[in-house]
Amino acid sequence: MKILITDKMEEIGIKIFEDNDFEVTKNFMITKEELKQKIGDYNAVVVRSRTKLTADVLENAKNLKVIGRAGVGLDNIDQKKAAELNIEIFNTPEAPAVSVGELTLGLMLTLARRISYADRTTHEGQWNKNECLGYTLEGKKLGLVGFGNTAKYLAKITIALGMSVGVYSRFSKGQVAIEEAKDIGCLIYPTIDELLTSAQIISLHLPSSPQTENIINEERIKIMRKDAIIINTARGNLIDNKALLKALKNRDIAGAALDVYRKEPLDDQDLIDWNENLILTPHIASQTIESQTAAATIIAQKISNFLKKK
C-alpha cells in the first residue's frame, strides 16, 4: 500500500506507517497540478489544511481508498466527491481540544486584561498603566456556540475559574448531549440569540458549513452586550468580518480575537490595520507540540488500521 503525505506532519506518524510496512512518500510542497497527476498512484493521502482535495483532484484518485486529515476541519476536502468514489475519510477531532481550549482562554485573558495593548505600548517606551484597567473572568458568563471536544474542555476549565457557562449548539435536541453539558455545569440555551443576548464572552466552536456561514452577522452583533467580546478559534467563515469591524470601531461590542480567517494567510487589510480592540493570531490554536504529535499519531493509527483490513 502506498501513502502520500502532502503537508508537514510529525515524524511519529510517518514511523507508524513505516512500521506497518506501508510505502510512504512525503511531498510537503506539492502543487495542485502535481497532485492531480500523482494522486492516482496512491492508496491513501494524508493532508492538513494547506492541501485542497477538490473534486477535480479526486477525479484522478483511481486507487485512493482513504483520506486522512491530521486536524479537525474537513472543509478542504470535497466530502461529496469522496463519497461518490467510495473513499473513506478520517480526521482527528480529539487531538487539539486542549491546545485550542487553552489558546481560547489565553485570548479571553488577553482581551479582558488588555495584555496585548500593554505589551505593545510598553515596548514603545510608554507607561500606560491607567489605560490598562481590565476585568476578571471570575463571575463572568461565557457563551459557547457549539459543544464539541474543545468547547467541553473549555467549559470545564472556565467553570473552575468561577465563570458561568451557557451553551447553544445543534446538539440541543439530543438528550445525551444535553445531559453531558448539564453534568459539566452548563446552562442550555434553546436559541443562539438568547445566548448572545446574555453572555459577556462569546466563543465559537462550530464547523464550516452553509448553515454556519456568517452565523455571527450584523443583526446578531446588534443584540449582543456592549461589553461583549467574541473569540473565534474555529473557522473563519463563521463571522461577517465587515460587520464585526464596524461594531468594533463603533464600540458596539468591547473586543474580538480571531485565530482563523476566510483566506489564509490573512490578506484583509482592514482587519490587519485595526488593533485597538482586536487581536489577530495566525491560526495557531493547535500549534503545540502535544497537539501535533497527537494528530499525527491518531491519523496514522486510523489509516493503518483501515488499510490493513483491505
Image: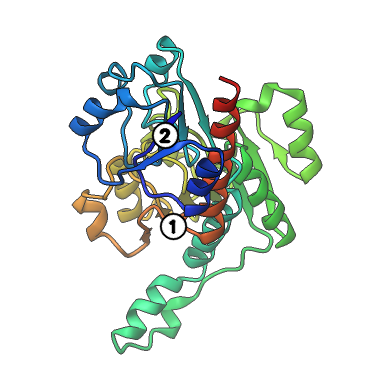
Badge 2 or badge 1: first in the primary sequence: 2
The kind of residue tagged 1 is Ala
Left or right placement of residue 233 versus residue 189 in this view = left
Q: Quadrant of the C terminus?
A: top right
Residue at the top extreme, as displayed = 84
- Residue located beneath label 1 in the image: 254
Using the rendered view, name the quadrant where residue 239 is placed: top left
Q: Nearer the viewer, mark 2 or mark 1?
A: 2
Left or right placement of residue 175 versus residue 108 in this view = right
- Residue located beneath label 2 in the image: 3
The kind of residue tagged 2 is Ile
- The location of residue 122, given as percent across then percent down, is 36, 85
- The location of residue 286, given as percent across then percent down, is 49, 53
- The location of residue 191, given as percent across then percent down, is 59, 29
Residue at 44 percent of width and 36 percent of height: 220
Residue at 49 percent of width and 75 percent of height: 133
Residue at 27 percent of width and 23 percent of height: 57
- The location of residue 251, given as percent across then percent down, is 37, 55
Q: Is residue 216 above or below residue 174?
A: below
Residue at 43 percent of width and 52 percent of height: 253
